[in-house]
Amino acid sequence: MVTFLVSKGWKKDPKDKATRRTHENDSWTNKFLEIVGEVRKKLSIATAELIRIKENRKLTKRGKKNRSLLQKECSCLSASSLVSSIEKQKSLLRKLKVSFGRKRRQEEAKVLNRQFKEDPGRVYATITMMAEEDPDNARPKYKVARNEDQTSASKGVFSDIVEAEGFWRRLWEERGTGDENAEWLKEIELAISQRVPLPTVGTWTLETNEAVKVILKKRNWSAPGPDRVVNYWWKRACTLHEGVASAFKTITSSSCEYPKWFTEGKTRLIPKQGDFTSENQRPITCLNTSYKWFTSCILGPMDKHLKVHDLMEKKQRQDGVGRPTTYRLTGQ
């Protein structure tokens, strides 16, 4: 009986306990983020529908889908019911923020109590060091100890621009120490060459009517980039359509660099709710509408190529449906 229990993991290594605690902490954090994400999604949908009703805009396919989701929350879709729903979601977000802070403080207290039980001297040394770092403060704030084995870069956060620059410089500018003639690389190259067809000799073609179909799908008044030209004017400048399509073909076939302004964007910092601080903002970048038109034109042939030659899972290819074209091309 004892042998059976031991073989099934009845008596575990103490290291497994620490791993389990870390997993539990990540689990409740991820669960909280999922709940917040759902609330923010509902808030965004309700806000967009309220704006559409006020501006009396046409209902799109996505709008119909979102409207059906809203009808589950609101029995009667009207401006007043949407405002009530929006305020309810905002109130829920505020409650979630408070509960998250309370839960985090409880978890930090548990960790500190566990450390004090296992090694009191280390806890006292940490507190003494924190007091010495802030001698002018009569009540210094306790800082949660971070894992010393984890650098700020490995956690996805850089302490300053020098650290960020050094991290990317090592990746892109320094020559690696790997073996470029390794046998497994040759096997991978052979497998890819058997799967992926050779590039076609012919150049990519873009007919004017195809380019026009792409721009007609764009929203008229989407925020423009530095060129300050909205899609509304591109749609109605019919005499320019042939030249634009020709320019797009030239960009893809020519070895010369295209103008820098073509891919430029205008970034704005949108303040979030709450106290205004530099960290409490979200950046939004508006690219030139001509560049977004161009990337949408090449997205169709690329997606068709991936589908015909089965180079990507269907679910993965369709992950970016409804998202910006640059996201589907770059994954960002």
Image (spheres, rainbow, N blue to C red):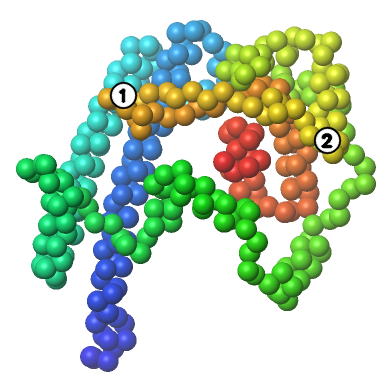
Disc 2 residue type (three-letter): Cys
Near mark 1 (Cα within 10 A), the count class, few <14, some 14-19 or many ≥20, is few
Asked if one can make out residue 3 in the rendered structure from this viewpoint, the answer is: yes
Q: Residue at x 78, y 49 (%)?
A: 308
How far from the left and from the top, in percent, is residue 196? Answer: 79, 57
The residue that appears at 73% across and 13% down in the rendered structure is: 235
Q: Secondary structure at mark 2?
A: loop
N-term mark: 2 or 1:
2
Q: Position of residue 280 (x, y in %)?
A: 35, 30
Left or right, residue 45 beside residue 296 = left
Q: Circle 2 is placed at which residue position?
A: 256
**Residue pointed to by mark 1:** 276
Q: Residue at x 27, y 68 (%)?
A: 18
Report which quarter residue 229 is drawn in: top right
List x then y, in percent, for residue 327: 60, 38
Q: Residue at x 23, y 91 (%)?
A: 1
Q: Are marks 2 and 1 in contact (CB under 8 Å)?
A: no
Q: Amino acid at mark 1?
A: Phe
Give the x, y percent position of residue 189. 76, 66
Q: What's the mark number on residue 111?
A: none
